[in-house]
Image: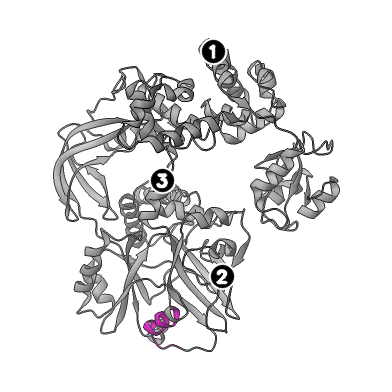
Amino acid sequence: MNQKTDRMKELVKILNEASYAYYAKDEEIMSNFEYDKLYDELESLEQELGVVLAGSPTVRVGYEAVAELPKEKHAQPMLSLAKTKDREELAAFLLDKKGLLSWKLDGLTVVLEYENHKLQKAITRGNGEVGEIVTNNASVFRNVPLQIPFAGKVILRGEAVICYSDFEEINKKITDAKEQYKNPRNLCSGTVRQLNNEVTAKRNVRFYAFSLVEAEGEDAATRKEQFEFMKNQGFEVVEYREVTAQTMAENVEYFAKKVADYDIPSDGLVLLFDDIAYGKSLGRTAKFPRDAIAFKWQDEVCETILKEIEWSPSRTGLINPVAIFEPVELEGTTVSRASVHNISVMRSLKLGIGDRIKVYKANMIIPQIAENITQSDTVEIPQVCPVCGHETFIEAVNDVQSLYCKNELCPVKKLKALTLFVSRDALNMEGLSEATLEKFVQAGFVKDYTDLFHLERYRDEIVSMEGFGEKSYENLIASVEKARNTTLPRLLYGLGIEGIGVAMAKQICRDFSYDANRLVNATQEEVSAVEGFGEVLATSFCAFFKEPSMRELWDALLDELHLEQVELQGNNEAVMGKTFVVTGSLNLFQDRSAFKEYIEGYGGKVAGSVSAKTECLINNDTTSTSSKNKKARELGVSILSEEEFLKQYGLTLS
């Protein structure tokens, strides 16, 4: 009994950590396969022992809403659904009734509210009881009607998603593989909860309705009638099929064949009784309604033999392990390789060449290792980089161990450094994609950053390259020449100094009055005094410029570039050098970036969190109970609206 109770406690902790990472932080720390396996084990133990621990995921719903967005309680609680992977159990659920079988889409559930024909409010699912208000973002979803024919109050639920095709296009524009988004679901969740709906609009979020909560004065008898009502109002609804217990198998098979090529992310199906009154008469459990059930794809698992581990270097120096195994048929395709993700995962699987392993496709798409039967644990971690032959090292970040190449001159790292240097937030050289840079490096045109400014030396060779021509060459040279006029923060960020991102580059340049000479000769004590810089980051920054080769490169780049002078908007001693925090929605400024630039123009700084150094917190909802407002009150930091801020500091909008 004690051992089983201890195991339950362990499972509750593991599953809750995974759920929090997945729902609140948009991170995936374990596969769906592994989560479901542990969830089923916990549920089985609870049934066996008759004990349900406080905080168990079997009685909790969803994630906690983050503090950055206003919150609101749902008119009706949003419950999770009971689930099954058994097709016969799915058919038996219907008894002799008619049902609707539809996709279970994998995005972020959103509730839309309309009144007087117009969209009034959009709220995320949140924790099922309280969600986040995202009306501003929902108004720019690709297919959400802002006005509908129906004049009365309408509340409906649906899934906000980013299609696979759009997801791939978004990632193509991100040259650093380490910075690319992991999956459409995580990207969609973060996008819908953005504070700037301009970002949301660019990411092609779509909304598919799956439930009508209320339609004032309408009294539909069936779910199908509700779906038809929503379609008549201009909504796209999830694809559904009418089913009975007898036709369940063929309809599940219809969706199963379609899912592999389906552009909309889906992690299963939903079955609900078509007869609304009958469904309501069944009531609900503490967590689940009894009128619907979710069907999760039964992952097809195949046993095979591990042939080798391929170590695949990335452009960041990260070396990823990839399992190569004897080919097997999974979900209609032949697969022979699967990512092992990192050293921690590899060690947990105890992999060895020749081991018998079980593989599956997560959500019927991505090959994964489900289990290692043999567990010989004999795979050796390479001591040298497979690209350059230099020594490797293991680094742990948040308890996750990964393998890296130590060689700063590794060709893969060199390509990554050049890619960062020409990226949008750095020198912004259009036309120099990673693929093009790789060709130029291999051809010997580019050995370091300064060579990028002298590509005219290789005009004939570039024009004759595949994919190039006279016009492409001219556009490239024009872009390079334009990039010669840049700013000190852009140059600093482009050098790829460890820990110096876009914001930190701007911060330190402001503190040193955009004086390049002062900046590179700064002492560690001076750099440590810059807000956001600690001893470690200051040491890294100063060490970079103490390196003779780096100073030589810096001087060479200054000869190639014209650094624009940054002028402050005015001399305002009340703002100069002070730190401000901006949160919540804005009325006077287009977005936070615009407000941040405005404050920085007067010599102020904008931080992301409230501290004892904060001059004031700017939040139009001065009475809210958000975490930042609470922190400000605890520290005695004043909370001002935009208008109050401008008035108190003697500022005006031109």
**What is the x, y in percent for residue 574?**
84, 38
Q: Residues within 10 Å of mark 3 (few under 14, many from 20)?
A: some
Which residue type does callout 1 highlight?
Glu
Residue with the mark numbered 3: 171
Residue with the mark numbered 2: 74
**What is the x, y in percent for residue 649?**
84, 45
Name the colouring of the figure. Answer: one colour
Q: Which residue shows up at 52% across the image and 71% down it? A: 77
Q: Which of marks 2 and 3 is nearer the N terminus?
A: 2
Q: Nearer the viewer, mark 3 or mark 1?
A: 1
Give the Cα separation between the discs numbered 2 and 1.
61 Å
Which residue type does callout 2 highlight?
His
Q: Give the range drawn in magenta.
A: 220-230
Depicted 598 relative to depicted 32: above or below: above
**Foreground pick, 385 / 441:** 441
Q: Which residue shows up at 30% across the image and 23% down it? A: 387
User: In terms of secondary structure, where does tag 1 sit?
Assistant: helix
Query: Is residue 314 found left or right of 21 in the rendered image?
Result: left
Residue with the mark numbered 1: 552
**What is the x, y in percent for residue 344?**
35, 34
Q: Which of marks 2 and 3 is in front?
A: 3
Q: In which quarter of the image is residue 114?
A: bottom right
Q: In which quarter of the image is residue 321?
A: top left
Query: Is residue 258 found left or right of 441 in the rendered image?
Result: left
**Foreground pick, 107 / 30:** 107
Q: Earlier in the sequence, mark 3 or mark 1?
A: 3
Q: Residues within 10 Å of mark 2 (few under 14, many from 20)?
A: some
**Number of marks in the rendered image:** 3
Q: Does the magenta stretch include residue 224?
A: yes
**Foreground pick, 215 / 76:** 215
**What is the x, y in percent for residue 341?**
33, 38
